[in-house]
Each structure stands twice: as C-alpha cells, then as structure tokens.
Amino acid sequence: MAAPTSRPDPRDDYRVIRWTEWYQSKGLSKWAANRLRKSGKGPRVVQLTEHAIGVTVKDDREWTEARTREGV
C-alpha cells in the first residue's frame, strides 16, 4: 500500500509570522530587517496591532525565492 501524499494546506499561505520570528529565521539582525522593510526591499508586512507587524508565509516564500541565486 502506498503512503498517502500530504499536500500543504493552502491556508498556511495566510498564516502570519511575527516580525521578530521572521527576521531571526532569516539570520538577520533587527537593524538589518528594519532597514530592508523601511527601504521597501523586505517582504510585505501585515499590521497586526498598532505596534505589531508580521509577514505571511506566502510573502516570506516569495521574498525568499526572489533572492535565491544559482551557482553561488
């Protein structure tokens, strides 16, 4: 019997990663991440509260893929 294939849940694309968790997962400092965001070179952010922001899984993936270089 073949193992069932697991498909990613499309709802995961809209799960929000808190800003601190996001930049730490990328190995960025808070300063570098905020510089990227303020310059418009970071991923799109979601305003969660007056003071909290995050990044959707989809926007994180797209931002990361856009920066992937081959042959490095």
Image: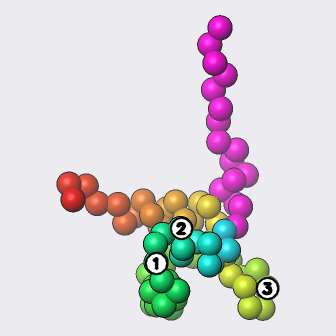
Q: Where, quadrant-wise, is the N terminus in this rendering?
A: top right
Is 7 situated above or below 70?
above
Q: Secondary structure at mark 2?
A: helix
Mark 1 is surrounded, within 10 Å at the Cα level, by few (under 14), some (14 to 19) or many (20 or more) other residues, namely: few
70 lies left or right of 14: left
Q: Which residue is mark 1?
A: 28
Q: As shown in the figure, which amino acid type bears the numbered disc 2? A: Ser
Query: Disc 2 vs disc 1: Cβ atoms closer than 8 Å?
Result: no
Residue situated furthest left in the rendering: 71
Which dot marks residue 25?
A: 2
Amino acid type for the residue under numbered disc 1: Leu
Judge depth for marks 1 and 3 and give the one in front.
Answer: 1
What residue span does the magenta drawing correspond to?
1-16
Mark 2 → mark 1, Cα distance in angstroms: 8 Å
Task: From the image, give the main secondary structure of the stretch colored magenta.
Answer: loop
Q: How many marks?
A: 3
Give the vertical position of 46 relative to 34 (above or below): above
Secondary structure under the numbered disc 3 in the rendered image: loop
71 lies left or right of 56:
left
Q: Which of these two is toward me, 69 or 27?
A: 27
Q: Residue at x 70, y 44 (%)?
A: 9
The residue to which callout 3 is attached is 49
Q: Quadrant of residue 3?
A: top right
Q: Position of residue 68 (x, y in %)?
A: 35, 60
> Of the residues tagged 2 and 3, which is closer to the observer?
2
Marks 2/3: CA distance? 22 Å
Residue 58 image point, x, y percent: 59, 60
Which residue does the image show at 62% across and 61% down from the upper left? 57
